[in-house]
Amino acid sequence: MKFRVKSQIFAVLVMGVISANGLASDDKHETGHGAEHMSGEICTGFGPQTPRDIDSLAGENKRLFAMAPPSTEMNLCNLHFHKNAEHKAAAFSIYAGDGDGHGFETGYQCGISKELSAAEMAPTKEAICKGEHGELKPGDTIEVHWVHSSCDVKPGKGLGSCLSETCSNPDLRVETQVFTLVNDSSAMDFNELDYDGHVVNGLHQPKAIPTNTGKPVQFLGSTTGPKYNAQQCSPLQVTWSVRPQCAKLDINSVGEWCKSNAFEEDHAHGVRNLVVQKALLSDIKK
């Protein structure tokens, strides 16, 4: 049975959390260092958590809710990306390190990032998506999240754009792709994966999402971002669709997108430590 908000008070609280943190929670929150080093107590009573190793299908979390509809039947409400992959798979399994305590310089990197040519790794002419925690450079890995909502909403800033006063507990689905950034104009153009006012059958949709990076692994999970870890879980319920292979993306197109987009995004978000405890993971059905 799908879990639904029981009271208006709780709905207001959830909206406050969403508006403040977005699907990727606030970069400035302190978090633990690295999945390989997590230990101790875990949060209890929460639904399945995210991110996870999508090659490991087993999970023991008993909180059930229905899968969200296909993204083509929902409204795109937010688009953002994280520096390094939050999820892990064979194609993006290079551990980036324990991080800085804010969710940066940790997560996972694409294997193809270590196989790039000198031209692909050439420095950019200007800083790319520079923020408080640095900028993007050729060879970096990013994980892109296209967030979709069952609410009748328009794309905007943060996960708060995915709900409304009349739709405070929507179905949420995140389409996910991990990229290696290259200084190569012949690589995929991020602006072709943007929203830019694209409407199909009355629904806000991205212009495209990669279809050549393997069959997406679908599972039940939560919101992500460095606010959450094994001791502090996310209460929100999200259907995830994560593609298992990396793709190359032109870093200059990402830089142009950061200068102007409907989501007011201008930098990479931090990552949440990989969730490895089976009690916090859903069972993936293939």
Image (cartoon, helix red, strand yellow):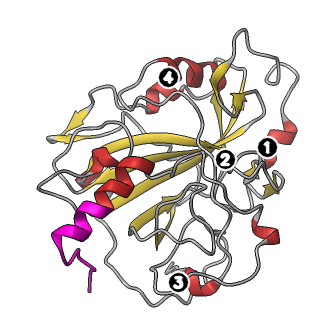
Of marks 4 and 1, the one in the foreground: 4
Residue 214, picture quadrant: bottom right
Q: Amino acid at mark 2?
A: Cys
| Residue 169, visible in the rendered structure | no
Q: Amino acid at mark 1?
A: Ile
Against 266, residue 15 (above or below) is: below
Left or right position of 68 against 136: left
Q: Amino acid at mark 4?
A: Trp
Q: 49 or 114, which is in the foreground? A: 49
The residue depicted at 49 percent of the width and 81 percent of the height is 285
The residue depicted at 18 percent of the width and 50 percent of the height is 164
First in sequence: mark 2 vs mark 3? 2
| Label 4 – label 1 distance at C-alpha | 23 Å
Of marks 2 and 4, the one in the foreground: 4
Pointer 2: what residue? 246
User: Is residue 161 located in the magenta-colored stretch of the structure?
Assistant: no
First in sequence: mark 2 vs mark 1? 1
In this view, which residue lies farthest toward the left?
A: 166
Residue 280, picture quadrant: bottom right
Residues in magenta, as a range? 1-13
Pointer 3: what residue? 283
Quarter of the figure with the N terminus: bottom left
First in sequence: mark 4 vs mark 3? 4
Element type at marker 2?
Answer: loop
The answer to whether the residues at label 2 and label 1 have Cβ atoms under 8 Å apart is yes
Place of residue 246 in the rendered image (x, y in percent of width and height, measured from the top left): 66, 47
Element type at marker 1?
Answer: helix
Pointer 4: what residue? 257
